[in-house]
Image (spheres, grey):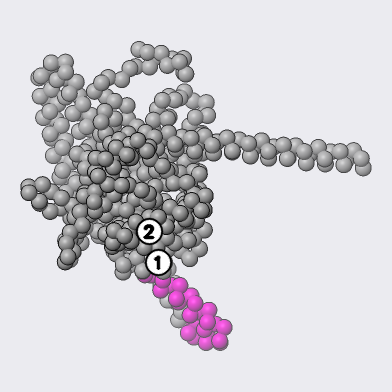
Amino acid sequence: PQRAPSQGRCVEPRTSREPGRESFNLMVVGEAGLGKTTLLESFFKSFRDEDATSALFERKETQKVIETRRLLEDAGTRRDIAERAMKAAAETGKYKEAKECEDEIARLSREMASLSEELKVLRAADEKRRVELQTLRENARATRMEMKRAADARDFALAAEKQAEAAALQLECETLQSALREMRRDPTTGAAACAEGDEGDEGHSKKSLTSSTVRVSRFDPFCITVGKHELVVSLIDTPGYGENLNTVDSFDVITSHVEGLFEAQLVAETSGAERDYERLRNEDPLVHVCLYFIAPHRLKHIDVEFMRRLHKKVNIVPIIAKSDTMTTKEKEEFKLQVRETLAREGIEPYAFDPISLRAMEAQDRQEYKPPWAVIGSTDAHLDAGVSVYLRKYPWGNALSSEPSHSDLPALRNLVMWSGQWQELKHASRMKYEDWRVSRSLATRSSFAATAAAATVAATARRGV
């Protein structure tokens, strides 16, 4: 065993078959309807790990949950209308109508309580199935690792046993995964259910009337392999962003979540319990990158204000969503407008390593400048025996994997394959350290001010 100098204790060295696992936490922020879920699915489709290709789909609500939630929202809207009608009737002396409204409010309240309880039961059952699937995947992964160790040790009998065991676990995973997929398909259309916070136009407009503020929703983590590294990816969605008239609420919720993660990391590092500093740094909960989705053609005030508030705490990568709605000239002009606006407002988006960026440009024969104009698609089509993902139009196709059509392949290669995810984690650590120092200085200033006030008060009492 090697000795860790920071802890003064022995640690077991890692084997070459078991590279250190590291967390990578990616937040997506943007208004509904910009295709955030579709883009994320496109982003991770290049990884062979089964977890990456299915985790997003499994996180989507089941049809039964969607139907129950919408009934609950509808009942809440009708109760609000009845409450306003009761108040108006009481003010004008129409007490009979007020009584009828009161009875309707009581009935709707009972209906909402019943729907809320049903929703809790449905979500708990779905969560139980997903946890069961995640456990099966972890067991299958661990069994495959045992098989590899046995093969390396030339214990082929044990390797064959573990291979059969892993195959059985994989079959269980596929059976449960098929059941989960079936629960998430619309029985009328056969299409997958919409992800939370990325609904269609009708669901979006209806939700806008009833949603009070943004929510921060963390997806179940999944593992991907990048070179010799195993990354535990956690996706953080922000459904409801931009739907409330008071946009300050949205900023406060997301800022509080980011600072809460800072607090959690600080507590973990300063607790009195025995600590593994390498693990604390490698598997930290911090938001390592925020993909901020900008609507094509127009940079809104809310976009600028959000990035101004968060760019000191999170690595922000601005993205132009659905860029296939823009001509090449419109895209270039809009990119320039966004860059000039951010520079004028003093906002610093994350800057990728220029050497890696130039190498990417030379490879793709494209010039890449922020913000990243992307196209996301999960519609697979065969082209010369190869599956390609594209968006079909009457006048042609827009390929999400073609560098001349979309910046998505370059963005994915920069973040994941060129090692920039490590730089993003390092930059997040620097932002956390800045927050920790400023928090410490603020605490000291507060203590000094309190002590000075106490001294003044004591002096005044002695004078009296």
Q: Neighbour class for label 1 at 10 Å: few (<14), some, many (≥20)? A: some
Q: Is residue 329 left or right of residue 312?
A: left
Q: Is residue 33 above or below residue 458?
A: below
**Residue 250 at what x, y percent from top left?**
47, 56
In the rendering, at what x and y percent does residue 93 appear? 56, 87
Which of the marked residues, 2 or 1, is nearer the chain's N terminus?
Answer: 1
Question: Looking at this rendering, what residue extends furthest in the left direction?
Answer: 385
Q: Amino acid at mark 1?
A: Ser
Q: Residue at x 49, y 43 (%)?
A: 313
Residue at the right extreme, as displayed: 464
Q: Nearer the viewer, residue 191 or 29?
A: 29
Q: Residue at x 47, y 18 (%)?
A: 6
Q: Main secondary structure of the magenta part?
A: helix
| The residue stretch that appears in magenta | 73-99
Q: Observer-nearest residue: 50 or 375? A: 375
- CA gap, disc 2 to disc 1? 28 Å
Q: Position of residue 381 (x, y in %)?
A: 12, 53
Q: Can you tell which quarter of the image residue 204 is in?
A: bottom left
Badge 2, how many Cα within 10 Å: few under 14, some, many 20+?
many
Mark toward the viewer: 2 or 1: 2
Q: Is residue 23 above or below residue 373?
A: above
Q: Quadrant of the N terminus?
A: top left
Amino acid type of disc 2? Phe
Q: For mark 1, what is the residue?
A: 208
Q: Which residue is mark 2?
A: 334
**Secondary structure at numbered mark 1:** helix
- Image label count: 2
Badge 2 marks a residue whose secondary structure is: helix
